[in-house]
Image (cartoon, grey):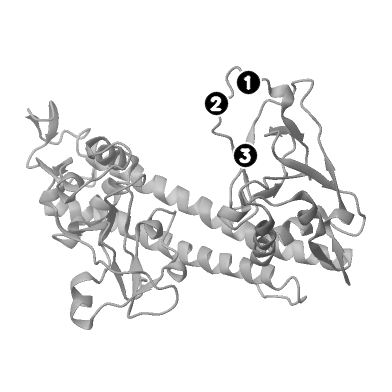
Amino acid sequence: MSYRKLGDLVKFISNKNTDGNATILFGINIDKFFMPSVANIIGVDLKKYKVVKKYQFACNRMHVGRDERLPISMSTFDYDFIVSPAYDVFEVISSNVLPEYLMLWFRRKEFDRQCWFYTDADVRGGLHLDALKSIEIKVPSIEEQRQIVAQYQSIANKIKVNEQICEKLEATAQALYKNWFVDFEFPNEEGKPYKSSGGQMVWNEELGKEIPEGWEVGTIGDLVDTQYGFTDSAHPSKGTAKFLRITDIVGNYIKWDDVPYCNILTKDIYKYSVEFGDFLISRTGANVGYGKMIGKHTPLAVFASFLVRLKPKSTVYISYLYCLIISKFYKDFVLSNSEGSAQPQANANILTKMDCLVATSEEYEKFNEEILPVVHFKEILDIQTQKLTQLQSLLLSRLAVGEEVSA
């Protein structure tokens, strides 16, 4: 086992898209994945862009000092695509290293820290090509590399399956919401679809359509109480309670291990602590209107001042509000009603003034019976995914010492 300089393992290439056959343009995000570019390429000569083939790498050395990470990724696609002419493209030329293993090394936090350290020589925060080539890579035997890659990929596959199941669970919840509260086909007393089975409907002037008898039109504010969050500075590793911020609620799920702490007095913890069924909504910035519902498996946590808590006035509303508030429709409503253009702002009134149907407690309770098992199952999968992600990070951190981790 030995260390080799990256420049000895790879060859940098610059194959331009001269024939124009490659038309898909990708960028690289800081999580080291290729993603569709947001650049406007209308009228742009794509023949000047660089082609990336399967198992070739591309990286952007321009802003490593700013981002403290090197955006770099390896193509696993079966087709050629193009990247910016400013990107570097290279491929493995040594028979002693697998491209997949090399990509795992690039995912290590230690690799990013080393790249960041080398940017001190550049006033713009860029990483010099010679510095990148000089970084040393640990090169075990090919068989060991295959084992490491297989272990990492096994974890990645489990994460992907969990994410796919979670997407289906979300789709199921939204489909049930539409069936009950848009199409009005919730089960009647005989278990049959209400509207198509002749359920009594009455005309509602406000909505301009018929709604089930006994239902009314209200706002989200009729179903929740609101509260602004706690003001304090976040502390990364210690404090009296976890401190939820906007950045913690805009992902697919709350990554509790990544949530920092704050120092809040014991007398204030009860006032700001979150519990199952609470909805935390961002009231400012690009993520205005984004929110999360607090699940059952939650550590002691309070929420920050740029979040607003919507607490259901009754537990029977939880599933209905879950489907309504987490929807894209709600986010779009909040954004369109926010004040300010460069930095959208929404107060508690804006976050709760969207119209909604107010059904009977019986319908809400039945809807809870349908949706809450879906919500709880998704939370369990999210927790599993977080643990698997931690296992991936542990595997990457141990590449340099040759330790194995158990999946």
Q: Which residue is mark 1?
A: 44
Please say if the residues under marks 1 and 3 sit with CB atoms less than 8 Å apart.
no
What's the distance in space between the residues labelled 1 and 3, CA to CA? Answer: 16 Å
Q: Looking at the image, can residue 160 be seen?
A: no
What's the distance in space between the residues labelled 1 and 2, CA to CA? Answer: 8 Å
**Observer-nearest of 114 and 30:** 114
Apparent side of residue 334 relative to residue 199 in the rendered image (left or right): right
Q: Residue reaching furthest top? A: 43
Apparent side of residue 385 relative to residue 406 in the rendered image (left or right): left
Secondary structure at numbered mark 3: strand
Secondary structure at numbered mark 2: loop
Q: Earlier in the sequence, mark 2 or mark 3?
A: 3
Q: Which residue is mark 2?
A: 40
Name the residue located 68 percent from the left edge and 48 percent from the top edge. Answer: 61
**Observer-nearest of 144 and 21:** 21
Quadrant where the image shows the N terminus: bottom right
Q: Looking at the image, can residue 49 be seen?
A: yes
What amino acid type should be assigned to the residue bearing mark 3? Gly
Count neighbours of disc 3 (C-alpha within 10 A) and say few if under 14, some if 14 to 19, many if 20 or more.
many
Residue 215, position as x, y percentages in the image:
10, 42
Residue 58, position as x, y percentages in the image:
72, 44
As drawn, the label of residue 385 is: none
Residue 155, position as x, y percentages in the image:
64, 63
What amino acid type should be assigned to the residue bearing mark 2? Asn
What's the distance in space between the residues labelled 2 and 3, CA to CA? Answer: 12 Å
What amino acid type should be assigned to the residue bearing mark 1? Val
Q: Earlier in the sequence, mark 1 or mark 3?
A: 3
Mark 1 or 3, which is nearer the eye? 1
Name the residue located 93 percent from the left edge and 55 percent from the top edge. Answer: 95
Q: Which residue is mark 3?
A: 27
**Observer-nearest of 69 and 325:** 69
Please say if the residues under marks 1 and 2 sit with CB atoms less than 8 Å apart.
yes
